Image (cartoon, rainbow, N blue to C red):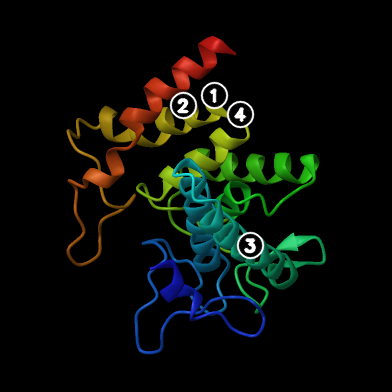
Amino acid sequence: MLARFDADRGADGLIRAQAGRRLFLDWSPVDRREPSLTYNGRYLYALDIAAGLALDADRGDLAQLWSGKAEHLRRAMRAAFHVEGRWTENCHGTPASQLGLALLLLTRCVEAKEDIATIADAIVARSLDLRDAHEDGRLVLASPFMHHYVFLALEAVQRHGDILAIIVSRWGRWADAGESTCWENWNVDFPDGSVCHGFSAHPLGWIAKCIAAEKTG
């Protein structure tokens, strides 16, 4: 499957969706014009995972293959999406989405410590801002189930307390309202929107994980 996606790589080193196929990034209103930071970030994250699994399986040849492709893509993403000190969602200047920023942290595209902290702060601030609807000038908020990647990114930079705060603020609203299930999106006013979406229940695992991390320091 990774090789199939690699076949969609352009001369600029970035992948694009196959012609005629819908590019789904999230239920949030992420700008889908290509090349896409979020789409390439998801593929880069998969390459990093594949390289790690290959090492675990004692397949150094595959680890070298996938890590090499990952580094090539990482450089291409920095060149395309980091413009004048800010990250963009595409080459049209659209500011990076919350999910896109999370993937940048997860894939180590951001290197400077101060930049990592600034991005993490922006990610947390958007989640704690309980205005769900998108407005110009604010990060595009990731959906509940894509917040799993937001939490993975925050975990990578040791922000366990912030993960717990987001869960209390956002999932806590449903608990306070007496909801017994997690929704597919923050608002489900779209066709087939589900108020019982298993993928959005990932905070159950994160709560225990973050409490343990906070206790151990």
* Numbered disc in front, either 4 or 1: 4
Query: Which numbered circle lies on residue 158?
Result: 4
Amino acid tagged 1: Gly
Q: Earlier in the sequence, mark 3 or mark 2?
A: 3
| Alpha carbons under labels 2 and 1: distance apart | 5 Å
Residue at figure coordinates x 51%, y 58% from the top left: 62
User: Would you name the residue on which mark 2 appears?
Assistant: 164
Q: Is residue 129 visible?
A: no
Amino acid tagged 4: Gln
| Alpha carbons under labels 3 and 2: distance apart | 35 Å
Vertical position of residue 188 compared to residue 163: above or below: below
* Numbered disc in front, either 3 or 1: 3
Q: Are marks 2 and 1 in contact (CB under 8 Å)?
A: yes
Q: Earlier in the sequence, mark 4 or mark 3?
A: 3
As helix, strand or loop, the secondary structure at mark 1 comes to helix
**x, y percent for residue 125:** 59, 41
Residue at figure coordinates x 28%, y 35% from the top left: 174
As helix, strand or loop, the secondary structure at mark 3 comes to helix
For this rendering, which residue is in front, 96 or 78? 78
Query: Which numbered circle lies on residue 68?
Result: 3
